[in-house]
């Protein structure tokens, strides 16, 4: 069995490592000339860390990352805190693994190193995807550099604007959501002492929210602020932003939010894209993984994790399978993942309103709203099913 993976991001590398561990040959084709990820933070919940441990990268990644004490809400204008989730030892006791805040390049490098340790020449750079095709014997990946490569299976892990997906299903690129995310990494020593706590904070208000948490053993604070009612006409998914525009978007917000904006060495403005889950992502010997299959808004903190889970379940489905049975194995992979990932996408979309509700305009209306939507019972209902899942053992 030879598997071709289009895309060398987090999902593609997780899948490659999981497959190689199981004796399945893999070739990864990545469009970039040099490997790397955007320097930003991501959250890896216990369900993701279970897989990273099985892949042999968890302990190293943990040594580079942060293990916050808790997640909390902060009201946009007064800063009043509300508890959301207890992390640290409590989440380990409940789910077996911690909740980590991770520097995205550290995760990507850890997975890349693992792939290369398993197969030194598995990753092919400067190999963007131009198209794909298949017949009853195999799948062919057409590259922008003119090459064509053939394997028994092709996995499109080529992101939210997946060429593999569009080749299979026609043009289905996502639509702009009307929301923009401002992203920055702030050196922790620049911040006032009270803003250096090992806590994940989500500032919520009418029409917007801001998330911040420590990274790289508290060397940096990751800052992501999302605002509604924006337009987007830039050709790419991100552009350089200005402190002045970001301050204007969050005018009237608490001084701590204003401080994070002002102290940001660099602000990138990202268009948030969205699309509804598709009912099928496998055709014959070609399937999809991660954002190519089920792109999600980043409001459930599962964007990287769902791709990592996909990679493990895919590898389990292909392990020990003869080449003639590859299409059936891919169908099993899709069946094992589609309901869960669709629920993730819907949950992230639903959290948009929960984070941006007009009831958050004043403390008087915010308090009953938070009690109704974010007390212990609804939080458990929204997150427990996510964290208890184990892609290493889930039915396939």
Image (cartoon, grey):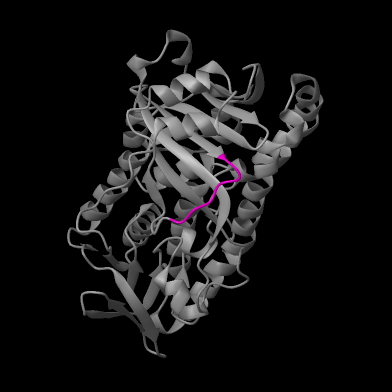
Q: Does the magenta stretch include residue 231?
A: yes
Nearer the observer, 164 or 271: 271
Report x, y in % for residue 42. Answer: 44, 39
Above or below residue 361? Residue 140 is: below
> Which residue is found at the position 53% from the left and 43% from the top?
47
Of all residues, the one furthest to the left in this rendering is: 121
Q: Does the magenta stretch include residue 343?
A: no
Report x, y in % for residue 34. Answer: 20, 54
> Which residue is found at the position 25% from the left and 59% from the top?
32
Give, as a single range, the part of the protein colored magenta.
227-233
- 195 with respect to 336 (left or right): left
Location of the N terminus by quadrant is bottom left
Main SS type for the magenta part? loop
Q: Is residue 290 visible?
A: no
Above or below residue 342? Residue 262 is: above
Nearer the observer, 94 or 208: 208
Nearer the observer, 333 or 283: 283
Above or below residue 89? Residue 374 is: below
Report x, y in % for residue 383. Answer: 65, 40
> Which residue is found at the position 51% from the left and 18% from the top?
256
Report x, y in % for residue 172. Answer: 53, 71
């Amino acid at each position: 069995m030879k598997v071709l993976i289009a895309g060398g991001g987090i999902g593609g590398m997780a899948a490659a490592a999981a497959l190689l561990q199981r004796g399945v040959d893999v070739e990864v084709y990545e469009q970039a000339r040099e490997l790397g990820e955007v320097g930003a933070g991501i959250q890896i919940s216990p369900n993701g860390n279970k897989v990273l441990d099985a892949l042999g990268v968890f302990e190293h990644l943990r040594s580079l990352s942060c293990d916050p004490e808790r997640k909390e809400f902060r009201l946009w204008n007064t800063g009043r805190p509300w508890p959301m989730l207890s992390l640290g030892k409590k989440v380990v006791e409940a789910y077996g693994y911690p909740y980590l805040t991770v520097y995205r390049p550290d995760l990507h490098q850890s997975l890349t190193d693992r792939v290369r340790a398993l197969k030194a020449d598995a990753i092919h750079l400067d190999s963007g995807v131009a198209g794909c095709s298949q017949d009853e014997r195999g799948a062919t990946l057409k590259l922008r550099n003119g090459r064509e490569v053939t394997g028994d299976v092709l996995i499109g892990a080529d992101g939210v604007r997946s060429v593999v997906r569009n080749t299979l299903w026609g043009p289905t690129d996502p639509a702009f959501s009307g929301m923009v995310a401002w992203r920055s990494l702030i050196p922790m020593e620049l911040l006032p002492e009270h803003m250096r706590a090992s806590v994940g904070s989500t500032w919520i208000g009418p029409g917007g929210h801001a998330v911040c948490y420590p990274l790289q053993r508290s060397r940096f604070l990751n800052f992501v602020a999302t605002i509604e009612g924006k337009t987007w006409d830039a050709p790419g998914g991100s552009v350089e932003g200005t402190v002045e525009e970001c301050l204007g978007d969050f005018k009237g917000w608490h001084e701590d939010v204003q401080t994070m904006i002002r102290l940001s060495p660099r602000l990138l403005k990202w268009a948030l894209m969205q699309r509804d889950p598709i009912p099928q992502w496998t055709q014959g010997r070609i399937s999809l993984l991660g954002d190519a299959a089920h792109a999600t808004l980043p409001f459930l903190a599962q964007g990287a994790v769902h791709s990592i889970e996909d990679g493990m379940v895919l590898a389990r489905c292909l392990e020990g399978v003869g080449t003639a049975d590859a299409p059936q194995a891919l169908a099993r992979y899709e069946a094992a993942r589609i309901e869960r990932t669709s629920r993730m996408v819907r949950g992230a979309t639903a959290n948009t309103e929960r984070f941006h509700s007009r009831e958050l305009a004043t403390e008087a209306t915010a308090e009953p709203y938070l009690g109704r939507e974010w007390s212990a019972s609804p939080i458990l209902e929204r997150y427990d099913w996510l964290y208890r899942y184990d892609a290493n053992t889930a039915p396939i």
